[in-house]
Every structure is written in structure tokens, then in C-alpha cells.
Image: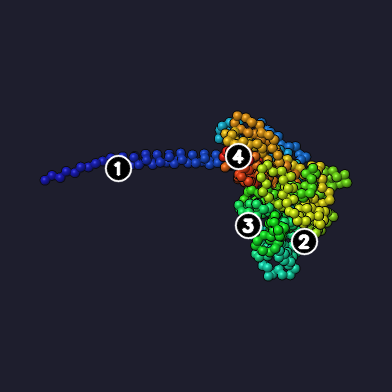
Amino acid sequence: MKSFFFIQRGFALLDALIAMVIIATGVLGIAKLNSILLAGTGIAKTRAEATQLAEGKIEEFRGLQPPAAKPVTNTTGEFISGVNAQFTITWIVESAGVTNTNLDKVYVCVSWGDACGGTGEKKVELSSLLAWTDLATFAAIGSGQVLPMEGIPGTPTGSAQEVSDSSYALDSMTAGMVDNLIDGTSIAHYDGNTVLIETSTGKVLLLIHDGSSFSTISGNVYISWGSGVNNRKGSDISLSDINSYVHVLGSTGSACRQYNPGGLTSLPTFPASGDIEYTYFSYTCYMGANWWGNIAIVRLDGGDRVCIGDPIISQADTDPTSRRPFLSSIRYYRGYKCGTDNDPATCQSVGIGMSSGSYIQAHYGKPLTALQHHFLLTTIGGNPTHADCAVMQSRPTADANPFTNMIFHQGGNTGQLFCLTATCPIASGFVEYKTSFVMIVPVSQAALVEITSVVVDGGSCAAPTITDSQLIYHCTIDWKGWAGYFWSGNVTFTMSGSIEGVELDTAQPSGSIVGAPVIGCEGNKCIQFSSVPKEVTSFSVSLAMTPSAATF
């Protein structure tokens, strides 16, 4: 038998050639990937360097201040030889559009290979705001030595500081502690400080580092019969309801306590017998030396109006310091020290207890010592006026009407503005600021009802301009004596229907109004704003309305 042997030659060389081709292809791919990664790293380094240059230019502008020259637009640019590229820096400076402030907006562009105005990607663009005010002026404003820039109020804090997440063990502070059993607080001197403490918890409410004493502002908040707190009548309102839905608040640097003067859970009535006119609770606000600001009633349930002032004072007395009846949820507390000519330019802000130049503990609203600082929560229908407050405040028939009682020093209940010092140049416009805004209501909604007038708390609106598609209301808010950056209040419509829903279409400049508007006031005829920045000058309101056969 023959055997056949088949010998194959050359296949080992072919396999090697194929392997070399595969390896070469892989090496070329890796090389290409490496070049892409290196290019990407280079772009990232270049962009990072451009960002640093843009940020540096903005910080350079921030370092400038008067009397140095103010930065101006430069579209020609500066040329910088960077580590990763040759850069061109250009910038545009323009007004930020905020009324009565020296505030600019700056745009900085750093490019390499592309023009800043083009559509390429080889550029970095940053923007920021620049305040063109020298540091000495800012320091003077903060210390209360000069009037702040128009529209920007000075600091109201005084020497007391609000404290969060701090408490003391009460058993270690018995020495020198004074318990204010009526409002649930204690005052102690501890480690050279004066502290206001919530007695039941030991929580620190206010702290004064120099050990001086607290000053106070006190009063009552009266609730007229028929007023609604959480949709309940005045005679049914308890202190727990009050603490849930009504708050007395003071500006920064103060702490307000509200309490039942009788020490019971049910509120006392005024008069104490006979036909019940009011229920009421008491409040005390604590603050340190030099404090000035606002004390306000904040409602979380919408609805009732707030009245202040003395009904025996005529509405013809329109002086800002008048005690005339006033429809306002806020009372302003201001003090000033002025030159002999009483020129506002020579005035500087001083706060509570500083009338004599050095701090003397002061207490406003204590019985038999000073003007009463009462508020009245009352239901007033229709298109309310200050005169309506006078009517509601005159309702008690007892001789000791809390708003007109003349046995107190100076007599009567204080009005919208209370001066902490003898000099009070409010009438000259020293602290009078006004903001005008435009409110636009679509006719598609407004046509459902007849709107006869619009009233803004603390302001006014002119008759609307009517177009084919909208009602345009030009309104003004008076910021006289304001110590914060937000307005809050009601926009009330006199109309033949009721508001079902509210939406804001636009609000300048931030695109939103802080604190969403809600339906408030009697009969769902009011929009209630909780906090509107002063810079907001225009917004549109979409109103969902229901027509009614009966006019309001």
C-alpha cells in the first residue's frame, strides 16, 4: 500500500503578513486617537486660559472706584500673548437699567482666531454688574452717617443681632436673669453680653455684645367683630389662631413677641362688658441701641384690612408725621439728627434711644408713658379709604377708646410714621422714594366683568389706557420710610365679578416676582402680593374672572 504525504509550504509567511497589517492598522488608529485627544486638551487649556483672562478683566473693573475714570466700551480690544494662544479682549459697558442707581452691566469677550461678534466657538464671554460708588460712601451709608443712594435704604439693624440655632441652659444663667412672664421671654447678662431668651426653650432671640439694655415698642392688635382669621369670626378667634395666621414682625435687628395680656388661651374683649366690639392680643418688639425700621402686621390668610392712627385727627392733616387714620399694614420708625438749618443734606440717621446723642433705654407704647402703637384688623368692603379706618376706629362707645384715649402722653394712637427723635425731616422728602410700575390686564379676561377702579395699598393707579387687547394701568408705590427691598400689599379691583385665578406673564428685570400672588381680600376681588422687588417696573397679570349680575 502506498502512503501519500501532502506537504504545504508558504502559509506561515502569509499569516505573519496578515498579522502585521492588522497591527499597523491598530497603531495608526491609536495615533489618530492620540492626536484628537491632544487637540481636545489644547482647546480645553486655551478656553480655561481665556476664562481666566475674562474674569481678571472684570475684577480689574471692580477694583476701580471714583475718582478714577469709569470704564467705557472698548470694541477694538486688547491683545494678549497667552501661553496657549494669542488672545483679543473686548468689552461693552452699559447701564443696568435700574432707576436711581449708578449700576452698570459689563460684557467681556476673550477670543482667539474668532471675532467676538461672530458665530465661531473660539471665544469666551462673561458678564457681570458693576456698582460705581466709592468705598467711603458705602462705609458712610452703612454707619448711618449719610443718606444712602436714592432708592437704597440704609441699615436698620442697630446693636442687637438676631441669633439662629443658639440656646443657653437656663439653670446656668440664674444670676441677673429677669423673666418677662407676660410674653414668655427672659433677659440675662451673660459673658458680657445681653441676651433675650425664649424662656421655655432657652433659645436666644437677640444678642447685644456690648451688654447694653434692650429698648421696646409695644401695643395691641385689635380685631373687629366680623373680621376673618382662617374664616372665623372675631369672637371665636383664639391665641393659637393668631399665632398661626397673624404675625407682628419688625425689621432686621428686632424680635417681636405676641401674647394674651390676660394669660389665658382665649383673647380678651374690648370693652370688657356689654356689646363686644373687639377682641385683641398684645405684642412687644425688642431691639438694641440705634435700631430703626418698620413694624408690620403680616397676614397669611389674606382678607382683612389693617388700620392705624387716631380717628379724632382730621384727614385734612396730611403731614407725614400726622396721627390721622391710615390704611396700612406697616408703621415706620425713624430718627434723625440734623444741622441747625434742618437741611436734609446735613441729616444723619439715628435710631431708638439716641435722642440725647448717647444711648438711653427707651420704651414706646407702655401705658401712661407714650403714644399707643395699636393696629386694627377690620373688614372694610368696597373701595376702602383712610376715612373708612376712622369710622371703624370710632366704633367703641366706651370712654377709654384705645385709639383716642387722651390720658396717654401726647395723646392718641400713633399714625403711619413715628419719629424716634425730635427732628423729623420727613416732609422735606428726606426718606421718600417712589416706584412707578405698569400693570397690564388682558381684555380677553377683563371683558368678562366691569372693572371700575383699581387701588394699590400704599400707592395709587391712574385710569387705565384701553386698547383692543389689554387694559394698561400706570401705578405708583410710595416707599416713604421703607427699610427693606420689597413691597407687599393688595391690588384691589372694584368690579362686577370675582377673581378666580392669577398668573404673572412677565416681570422685569428678573423675570419673576418674589412671592407668588394669591387671591385675597373680601369677595375674591383682590390680588395679594407678598414681596415685590423695587426694581420691578412692569408686569402682566392674567386674571381668570367670573361675571356677576350684581355689581360690587
User: Mark 1: few, some, or many residues within 10 Å (few <14, many ≥20)?
Assistant: few
Q: Secondary structure at mark 1?
A: helix
Real-space Cα separation, disc 4 to disc 3, in angstroms: 31 Å
Real-space Cα separation, disc 2 to disc 4, in angstroms = 58 Å
The answer to whether residue 153 is seen in the rendering is no
Mark-to-mark CA distance, 3 and 1: 104 Å
Upstream in sequence: badge 3 or badge 1: 1
Q: What residue sits right under mark 2 in the picture? A: 213
For the point 68% across and 40% down, which residue is it?
Answer: 455
Q: Earlier in the sequence, mark 1 or mark 4?
A: 1
Disc number placed over residue 12 in the picture, else none: 1
Q: In the rendered structure, find residue 550 and report the number of the disc placed on it.
A: 4
Marker disc for residue 236: 3
Label 2 secondary element: loop
Q: Position of residue 145 (x, y in %)?
A: 80, 48
Residue at the limit of the structure toward the left, as seen here: 1
Q: Earlier in the sequence, mark 2 or mark 3?
A: 2
Which label sits in the foreground, 1 or 2? 2
Q: How far apart, in angstroms, are the residues tagged by discs 2 and 3?
A: 38 Å
**Which secondary structure lies at badge 4?**
loop
Quadrant occupied by the C terminus: top right
Q: Amino acid at mark 2?
A: Ser
Left/right placement of residue 447 relative to residue 220 reads left
Q: Earlier in the sequence, mark 2 or mark 4?
A: 2
Say if mark 3 contacts mark 1, CB within 8 Å: no
Mark carried by residue 113: none
Quarter occupied by the N terminus? top left
